Image (cartoon, grey):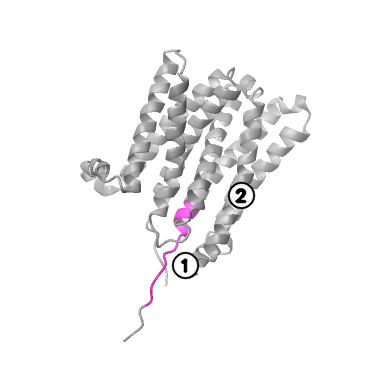
Amino acid sequence: MSFEPIWGAIIAWYLFLAGLGGGAFITSAFLGWRHPEAVSMRKVGHLIAPIAVIIGLVLLMFDAEGALHNPLRFALLLTNFGSVMTWGVVFLGGFTVVALVVVVLDFLKKSVPVWLDIVGVVFAVCVAVYTGALLGVCKTFPLWNNALLPILFLVSAVSAGAASVLLVAVIRHADEFNRVGVLKKFHFCLPIIELVLVASLMFITSFNSVAGWNSVMSLLVGQYAPLFWIGLVLIGLVLPTALETWLLFFSPKEFEESRKAHWISFGSDAGVLVGGFLLRFLVVMAALPVTITVPML
């Protein structure tokens, strides 16, 4: 028996962009704490944050076709605070407002208050975690109904957000890119953590039920195996880790700051972004529901 996915690529893009926006804001706040001199990179993160989330929300509206014909359906989500979706609207709305205010402050060349940074980071973390909790609402899908998924999506969101800021910095602000060593080392750790979480999610899900086993097998050896092993694991996790290990710990300082090294970092960060999207796409597409077989009477 085969099953059609209840969600598709548009939802995967929404989950990815919402997480990336939150991660970009968190990266900007981290830069303000550890690298306050990286002013331009902070502004890059501030700009990416609302743009990514707003594009993701537009895609969500197009996927939820009924909402296009009846926009008031979104307003009704604010009436049920026992729903994960209601809290998602609150988190996304609050984060978007804060992120836009910060962009305006940057445009007016005014400093962002610390308290606003903190509020933005709290909303950003909530948005990133919510993207995993949203899938977990579907309790009949073992791959989604797993406590590790929100944590995995949070780590992936911060990794993708940092990668997007670093990627732009390589092109536009190479001088600042060379000075943010703490951010680079922090970002270096995230794909490693993500790889451990992916393996743990696969292990736990495979022993959950027959549906969980079949979901994991479709990723490891089934129809999604090429995307999983080549796209997510190799390009999205292993290759960026290997490249950054070499650049940060084994290459000479002169080479690390060279333009050639910058383009290697660009490729590494692009791989992280590819992996971030594929993680969500594969989790959405490979999930199979638990089925109940009723014997013939």
The dot on residue 211 is 1
Q: Residue type at mark 2?
A: Leu
Q: Position of residue 210 (x, y in %)?
A: 49, 70
Where's the N terminus, which quadrant? bottom left
Where does the magenta region start and end?
281-293
Secondary element type, mark 2: helix
Q: Is residue 19 above or below residue 226?
A: above
Q: Position of residue 285 (x, y in %)?
A: 45, 56
* Residue found at the far top of this picture: 109
| Picture quadrant of residue 244 | top right
Kindly identify which numbered label has been placed on residue 107. none
Q: Which mark is residue 195?
A: 2
Q: Is residue 288 magenta?
A: yes
Q: Earlier in the sequence, mark 1 or mark 2?
A: 2
The one of 264 and 70 positioned closer to us in this rendering: 70
Q: Is residue 140 inside the magenta stretch?
A: no
Identify the residue at image location x=38%, y=73%. 292
Name the residue type under label 1.
Ala
**Image quarter of the C terminus:** bottom left
